[in-house]
């Protein structure tokens, strides 16, 4: 033990977080930047490129399953998503902290038996929208948080899960299952570079019901990104217990 009473940073205890990605990004997102600042080891895994998911062992202290252009309703087209869902099941059963974002959240919901699909009126969420926090969500979100969305599908809240937040387009925005699984429909990780990438790649969605114009998205970023990114960093600190001294940036 160190003088502080915490486990020493040792090559014999190389804890790290698995981050599963579904598309190429032009830059590290807000979450990866925060983990780097905290000197946390991150292992990126890209199953869409054929990379294999790791065996779950004591070195894996957390998992993040990020968003992407794939649909849970099209698993035959994206069979690697089935492997990710099976991996998420093992993570949940072991009690390892698991965070799902957008597609990741939808995969968790699907695995838990909840419906996932397109908006019944064809709405697309693209831009910044208010978060309506439930009583249970008060432990997770501050009042008045505006969140960035980029999704055409949403999820029903799983039967045994706790709804944490609602939204104006897609009703269910966040849920938890026990103490170690949390799912967000929205995107707290997106920075300006990634939003620029979205505006190029998702341009066809502008003009669809619910989607904001580029000007509205830009204004939303200027007004809300800093608070959203700061909140996300604080969430990661708590959820993955990033203040513990066993974290290493090399493994």
Image (cartoon, rainbow, N blue to C red):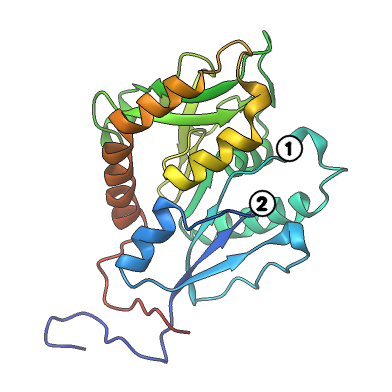
Q: Secondary structure at mark 2?
A: loop
Q: Which residue is mark 2?
A: 22
The image quadrant where one finds the N terminus is bottom left
Q: Secondary structure at mark 1?
A: helix
Pick the residue in front: 159 or 115: 115
- Estimate the spatial distance between the alpha carbons at disc 2 and disc 1, rounded to whole Å: 12 Å
Q: Is residue 189 visible?
A: no
Q: Kindly give the residue lying farthest to the right in the view shown.
A: 76
- Which marked residue is nearer to the observer: mark 2 or mark 1? 2
Question: What's the residue at 57%, 37% (across, down)?
Answer: 198
Question: What's the residue at 50%, 34% (across, down)?
Answer: 161
Picture coordinates of residue 78, whole percent (x, y)? 81, 47
Q: Callout 2 environment at 10 Å: few (<14), some (14 to 19), or many (20+)?
A: some
Picture coordinates of residue 232, whole percent (x, y)? 34, 46
Picture coordinates of residue 29, whole percent (x, y)? 45, 53
Q: Kindly give the residue lying farthest to the bottom in the view shown.
A: 11
Q: Is residue 54 visible?
A: yes
Above or below for 105 versus 45: above
Above or below for 41 versus 161: below
């Amino acid at each position: 033990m160190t003088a502080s009473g915490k486990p020493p940073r040792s090559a014999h205890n190389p804890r790290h977080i698995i981050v599963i990605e579904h598309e190429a990004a032009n830059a590290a997102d807000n979450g990866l930047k925060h983990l780097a600042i905290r000197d946390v080891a991150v292992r990126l895994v890209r199953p869409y490129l054929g990379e294999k998911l790791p065996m779950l062992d004591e070195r894996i202290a957390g998992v993040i399953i990020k968003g992407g252009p794939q649909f849970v309703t099209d698993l035959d087209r994206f069979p690697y998503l089935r492997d990710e869902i099976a991996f998420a099941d093992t993570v949940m059963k072991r009690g390892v902290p698991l965070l799902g974002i957008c597609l990741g959240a939808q995969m968790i919901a699907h695995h838990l038996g909840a419906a996932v699909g397109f908006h019944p009126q064809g709405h697309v969420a693209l831009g910044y929208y208010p978060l309506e926090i439930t009583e249970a969500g008060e432990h997770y979100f501050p009042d008045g948080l505006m969140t960035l969305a980029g999704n055409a599908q949403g999820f029903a809240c799983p039967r045994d899960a706790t709804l944490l937040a609602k939204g104006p387009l897609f009703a269910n925005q966040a849920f938890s299952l026990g103490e170690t699984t949390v799912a967000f429909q929205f995107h707290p990780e997106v920075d300006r570079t990634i939003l620029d990438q979205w505006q190029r790649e998702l341009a066809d969605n502008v003009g669809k019901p619910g989607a904001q114009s580029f000007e509205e998205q830009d204004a939303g970023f200027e007004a809300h990104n800093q608070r959203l990114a700061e909140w996300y960093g604080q969430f990661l600190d708590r959820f993955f217990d990033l203040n513990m001294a066993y974290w290493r940036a090399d493994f």
